[in-house]
Image (cartoon, helix red, strand yellow):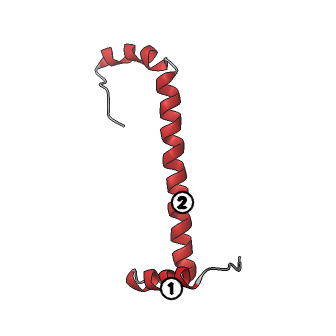
């Protein structure tokens, strides 16, 4: 799908420079990479929120019984 966006000159210059430094074929490739990074950042935040909700829910204490089978706590 083709879309049109308006960007300040300095943003367009950055995109062009980034594409050149990273050997990317087009501005579209740079924008695709930027969107992928935004999605990744959103997922990281969602996972952190989910972890915090789970750890504060008290369910962690229920799972403590499973450590008796040889499983140990892992860091996030």
The residue that label 1 is drawn on is 13
Q: Position of residue 49 (x, y in %)?
A: 52, 37
Work out whether 7 lies above or below 64: below
Q: Position of residue 13 (x, y in %)?
A: 50, 85
Q: How many marks?
A: 2
* Mark 1 Cα shell of 10 Å, populated few (<14), some (14-19), many (≥20): few
The residue that label 2 is drawn on is 38
Along the line of sight, the residue nearer the viewer: 5 or 62: 5
Q: Nearer the viewer, mark 1 or mark 2?
A: 1
Identify the residue at image location x=53%, y=35%.
50
Along the line of sight, the residue nearer the viewer: 41 or 66: 41
Q: Name the secondary structure under disc 2.
A: helix
Q: Earlier in the sequence, mark 1 or mark 2?
A: 1
Q: Name the secondary structure under disc 1.
A: helix
Q: Position of residue 31 (x, y in %)?
A: 56, 74
Identify the residue at image location x=45%, y=14%.
62
């Amino acid at each position: 799908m083709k879309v049109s966006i308006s960007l300040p000159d300095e943003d367009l210059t950055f995109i062009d420079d980034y594409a050149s430094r990273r050997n990317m074929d087009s501005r579209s490739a740079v924008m695709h990479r930027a969107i992928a990074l935004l999605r990744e950042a959103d997922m990281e935040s969602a996972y952190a929120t989910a972890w915090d909700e789970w750890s504060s829910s008290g369910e962690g204490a229920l799972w403590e019984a499973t450590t008796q089978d040889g499983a140990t706590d892992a860091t996030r």
